[in-house]
Image (tube, rainbow, N blue to C red):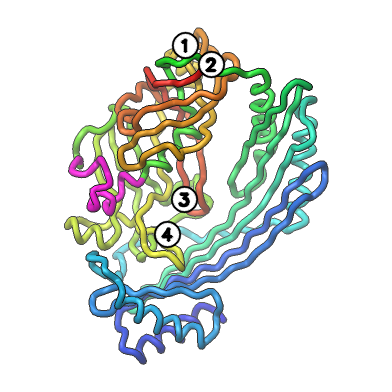
Amino acid sequence: MNFSEIKKIISESAKKIGIAEYDIYYSESSETSTETLKHEISGFSSSDSIGIGFRCIVDGKFGQASCEHISKEELEMLVVKAADNAKYIESSDEAIIFKGSEHYENVPCEQFRAPTSGTLRDIALEIEDKTYKEGELVTDGTQCGAGTGVVAVHMYNSYGLELHKSAGYVYYYSCPVVSDGKETEDSVEAKNAKNFDEIDNVVKKAVKNANAKLGADSVPSGSYNVIISGKKFSEFLAEFCGCFSAKQVKLGLSKLAGKLDEKIASDIVTITDDPFSDELCGKNAFDGEGVATRTKNVIENGVLKTYFYDLAMAKHFGVEPTGNASRGYSSPVSISPYFLYLNKGDKSFDELLEIAGNGIYVTELKSFSATNAVTGDFSIESAGYLIEDGKIGKFVKSFTIAGNFFELLKNIEALSNDLQVEHSGLFRGFASPDVFVKNISVAGK
């Protein structure tokens, strides 16, 4: 059953029970992955899924339901369930079905040709073979893998608005285990992309980092000059991006409430959300409610310029929506960025090292479990390299960096001139240059 047939059945069902305002969110995806161990394929999985979400307005409230089994009976029941669910909604947010934006960016649906299962198998084995050859200390336990995914989304509503997007990607990784006879260490390097062009770089980085950990020690506790790698600072952005949500502001769960047009970060900090970035495997011309997306600076030269708004929050605050409504077929609308990145600076990595003098280059963050997304406080077990006399020194591990995200933004003193991308999803991602900050609290040995 194609989408035209699906929307016809749902539309007729809605009309029968008197539902005038509704929308349909249809998602289909396929994923294939393979992994290796001891020069053999140790795991393989392949899945295809289809999901349909239906929202309708009943007595001023949203009702929502979803299904994964596509039949005329299921689709008719989907409408009935959604209408019934509206009776139990207690949200005070206004329910809005969007009529459509005046203009949508022309974002062609890229023709992505997913690699076959055989190709993925060969690539995973190739990565493993290269990983073993990259270092003589690489030993059993080493795992590598490759995979691919394709997603297509269709949206339609009772005002006749119809939108579509699709994209595909590949991913691959190397996870070498190294041993010098005294101790064993591992590392992982992964890549989400549109092709397999950087296999050699992924392998080299993974093995180099694993080897560096052998014989590593911690550092004495104290206050250090710190360079946080771009990939790791991207994780900070992913963890704390909720502070820019207008919903969180309304609920009193963001420290940025009431700070629009105020200075909240260093002069060199500009953070941008770009739904059309070439770094994304899938670009976004519309959001989960059908609103046209746009590129915007959230922080510009240290000044907070906007929050992220969906339709309800835009109505509540009396502003235009920013097109940041996020949605899956079975989940309610939330607010999130697309490609959120800290703009790069003007320093080479060597220049950052010279500025730091002595300190730590943080390249690993173990977990964000001991963080508070509302207050911004964090305490994270970390690893990285000593910086000694402006040069990279030995690897150090098992130390904890602690501080506050909002203070971190204020204290950024220099940024590298390259952007490192950390993807979190097909249509979403985060990126940052290397970030230099003075006097970070470090708990070590």
Check the image and report above or below for 100 versus 264.
below
Cα distance, mark 3 to mark 4? 18 Å
According to the picture, the residue beneath numbered tag 2 turns out to be 386
Cα distance, mark 2 to mark 1? 8 Å
Q: Counting other residues with Cα less than 10 Å from the Cα at mark 1, is it few (<14), some (14-19), or many (20 or more)?
A: some
Q: In which quadrant of the rendered image does the N terminus lie? A: bottom right
From the viewer's perspective, is the residue at label 2 or at label 4 nearer? 2
Left or right of residue 172: residue 219: left
Say if residue 99 shows up in the picture. no
Helix, strand or loop at mark 4:
loop
Taking the spot 31% from the left edge, 33% from the top edge, the residue there is: 406
Q: Of the residues shown, which amino acid type is indicated by label 1?
A: Asn
Say if residue 386 shows up in the picture. yes
According to the picture, the residue beneath numbered tag 3 turns out to be 428
Check the image and report above or below for 386 versus 334.
above
According to the picture, the residue beneath numbered tag 4 turns out to be 106
Check the image and report above or below for 425 versus 28.
above
Dot 2 or dot 4, earlier in sequence? 4
Q: Of the residues shown, which amino acid type is indicated by label 3?
A: Arg
According to the picture, the residue beneath numbered tag 1 turns out to be 358
Give the quadrant of residue 8: bottom left
Dot 3 or dot 4, earlier in sequence? 4
Relative image position of residue 37 (x, y in whole percent): 78, 44
Q: Of the residues shown, which amino acid type is indicated by label 2?
A: Leu
Q: Which residues are magenta?
A: 242-259
